[in-house]
Image (spheres, helix red, strand yellow):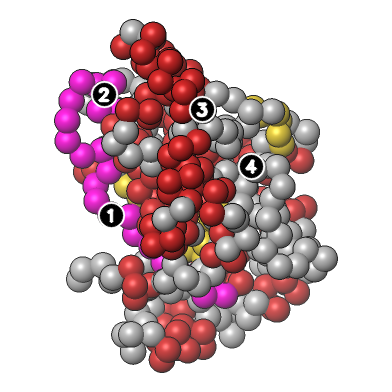
């Protein structure tokens, strides 16, 4: 059965939360240890993480959770068209040109020129398209996947696909699905026996949030929103050799910002009732400061550890009194939580929109396709 059209899953004009999965071609360990050649490509996980962090500072999209494994990656993203609507035309043009410089000689300089920014900002038709793309998760995934593939192919001196095809996308319909999916993503290395606990699961959002709570910081990979004067650009291009221009481009890619909390580039986890409206981030390291779960980070981490300690479905323990009210409020049947998280793919793998059965039914009625796969399986986990 072919994957559904993106328009059947979500529309960029609406705020939506998507679970995105992108796999390496033939599921090869192109960001892990290759079993055939013995080469270790694990360093590419940091390439991917930094690229996600960089795009989070440019796009009007919140990164809620992520996990980067040896042959695939998971992302939970929230599109924010309300945030991009608050940006001026010049801000939108500058952000777009930092990621997509186009076929122009000034792209060798690393920063767009003021002339290029003004030209794009003064084109209303083009600006409408760019605004839509900056809150479009498909364009986010394109800007993430393509440079990684090019860099890996350049390094190995080869051509061909790095990713197996277009990414899989599921729209998360309610908080129950969002919580279960985030924990499924954060526990992926534990589930794959690559780590013993969330605290040792590097290259996951859980690891970043735990280390940030312990005071760990990183150098920001956020894109500095700066331009270069046209005259200065012409002077640099005229006086520099191709090798010097190449070094300049590399330096621009390696530019680091001020130190931030390790999870500072991701959306806060806890929903704060005092944070209303778009809640645009003022530091330029992420789209907004709006949370996404009605629980504290401490409760989330505690439930994550408990869920991870239960192992697979045949080793489920009884839910403790501390977490029972949280799951009851979400309508999740007692004793089914661990099975739902550990086997999220079994329950919702074929669904366009994971959620409670009632919510999935509502979405099917309102959508283009009047049937939502996975409702029968979901009834097993929900009251």
Examine the rendering and report whether any part of residue 204 can be seen: no
Give the label on residue 154, or none: 2
Based on the picture, tell me whether residue 172 belongs to the magenta stretch.
yes
| Mark sitting earlier along the chain (2/3) | 2
Examine the rendering and report whether any part of residue 7 can be seen: yes
Please say if the residues under marks 3 and 1 sit with CB atoms less than 8 Å apart.
Answer: no
Whole-angstrom CA distance, mark 2 to mark 1, is 21 Å
- Residue density around tag 4, few if under 14, some if 14–19, many if 20 or more, within 10 Å: many
Q: Which residues are magenta?
A: 151-174
Point out the frontmost of discs 3 and 4: 3
Q: Is residue 174 above or below residue 187?
A: below
Q: What is the x, y in percent for residue 380?
A: 48, 80
Q: Secondary structure at mark 3?
A: loop
Q: Nearer the viewer, residue 349 or 381?
A: 349
328 with respect to 13 (left or right): right
| Mark sitting earlier along the chain (3/1) | 1
Give the label on residue 285, or none: 4
Point out the frontmost of discs 2 and 3: 3
Q: Specify the quadrant of the image occupied by residue 366.
A: bottom left
Whole-angstrom CA distance, mark 3 to mark 1, is 38 Å
- The residue furthest front is 231
Q: Which residue is mark 3?
A: 229
Q: Which residue is mark 1?
A: 166
Q: Secondary structure at mark 1?
A: loop
Q: Residue at x 35, y 48 (%)?
A: 142
Q: Secondary structure at mark 2?
A: helix
């Amino acid at each position: 059965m072919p994957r559904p059209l993106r328009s059947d899953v979500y529309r960029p004009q609406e705020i939506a939360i998507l679970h995105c999965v992108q796999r390496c071609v033939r599921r090869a360990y192109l960001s892990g240890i290759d079993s055939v050649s013995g080469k270790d490509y694990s360093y590419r996980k940091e390439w991917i993480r930094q690229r996600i962090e960089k795009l989070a500072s440019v796009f009007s999209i919140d990164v809620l959770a992520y996990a980067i494994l040896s042959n695939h990656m998971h992302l939970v993203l929230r599109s924010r068209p309300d945030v991009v609507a608050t940006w001026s035309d010049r801000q939108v043009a500058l952000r777009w040109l930092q990621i997509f410089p186009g076929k122009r000689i000034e792209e060798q300089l690393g920063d767009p020129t003021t002339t290029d920014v003004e030209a794009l900002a003064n084109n209303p038709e083009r600006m409408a398209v760019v605004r839509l793309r900056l809150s479009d998760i498909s364009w986010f995934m394109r800007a993430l996947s393509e440079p990684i593939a090019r860099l890996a192919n350049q390094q190995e001196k080869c051509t061909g696909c790095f990713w197996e095809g277009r990414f899989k996308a599921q729209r998360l319909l309610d908080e129950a699905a969002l919580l279960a999916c985030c924990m499924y993503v954060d526990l992926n290395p534990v589930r794959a026996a690559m780590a013993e606990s969330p605290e040792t699961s590097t290259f996951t959002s859980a690891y970043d949030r735990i280390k940030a709570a312990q005071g760990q910081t990183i150098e920001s990979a956020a894109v500095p929103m700066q331009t270069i004067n046209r005259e200065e650009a012409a002077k640099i291009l005229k006086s520099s050799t191709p090798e010097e221009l190449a070094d300049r481009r590399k330096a621009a890619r390696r530019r680091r910002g001020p130190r931030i909390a390790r999870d500072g580039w991701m959306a806060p986890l806890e929903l704060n009732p005092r944070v209303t409206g778009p809640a645009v981030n003022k530091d330029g390291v992420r789209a907004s400061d709006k949370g996404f779960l009605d629980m504290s980070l401490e409760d989330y981490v505690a439930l994550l550890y408990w869920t991870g300690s239960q192992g697979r479905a045949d080793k489920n323990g009884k839910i403790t009194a501390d977490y029972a009210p949280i799951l009851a409020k979400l309508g999740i049947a007692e004793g089914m939580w661990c099975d739902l998280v550990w086997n999220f793919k079994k329950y919702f793998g074929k669904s366009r929109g994971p959620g409670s059965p009632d919510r999935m039914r509502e979405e099917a009625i309102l959508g283009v396709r009047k049937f939502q796969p996975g409702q029968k399986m979901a009834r097993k986990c929900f009251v």
